[in-house]
Amino acid sequence: MTNFDADILCELRDLQEVAIRTEKHPNTAVVIWVAVADEEVFVRSVRGTKGRWYRDLAAGGPATLQFAGRRLAVLGARRVSAMVVPDRAAPILCEGWKVGPSHYLN
């Protein structure tokens, strides 16, 4: 699967949080955690599967990540139940999503 370009990955790798807006709720941004591992981008919710944006992605809707003045259209590529990110002091173990650029995903 095609992923984000190197510049976007570098920017996201340096962040811990981004905002997400879903197509179903475009007027409300929610701050979420982001991590980059093996050139893939993962997002997770403090509320897990109960988070509204999480449920919107599960239903197949697109979303927009916002960070550093950018808006990046994404789709949830697959659900993950655990993530271990070696760059972090502690592993991230959670329910979350791998996301990719919306123009590359079906």
Image (cartoon, grey):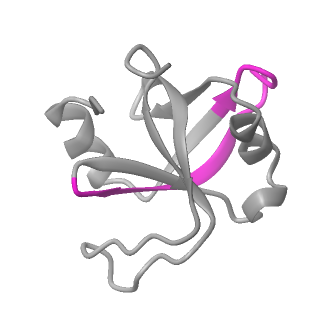
Relative to 61, residue 14 above or below = below
Which is more toward the observer, 62 or 17?
A: 62
Relative to 57, residue 96 above or below = below
Magenta span contains residue 14: no
Q: Residue furthest left?
A: 6
Q: Is residue 57 left or right of residue 75?
A: right
Residue 61 place in picture, x, y as percent: 69, 25
Magenta span contains residue 33: yes
Please tell me in which quadrant of the rendered image residue 50 appears.
Answer: bottom right
Residue 84 place in picture, x, y as percent: 38, 75
The N terminus sits in image quarter: top left
Q: Is residue 47 left or right of residue 89?
A: right
Q: Residue furthest bottom?
A: 90
Kindly identify the residue that appears in the image at 53 percent across and 46 percent down.
78
Residue 19 place in picture, x, y as percent: 58, 40
Please tell me in which quadrant of the rendered image residue 6 appears.
Answer: top left
Q: Is residue 42 left or right of residue 94?
A: left
Kindly identify the residue that appears in the image at 61 percent across and 36 percent down.
20
Kindly identify the residue that appears in the image at 32 percent across and 76 percent down.
88
Residue 94 place in picture, x, y as percent: 59, 72
Relative to 106, residue 40 above or below = below
Q: Is residue 96 left or right of residue 83?
A: right
Relative to 105, residue 85 above or below = below
- Give the magenta range: 21-38
Kindly identify the residue that appears in the image at 20 percent across and 44 percent down.
10
Which is more toward the observer, 14 or 97?
A: 97
Which is more toward the observer, 24 or 29?
A: 24
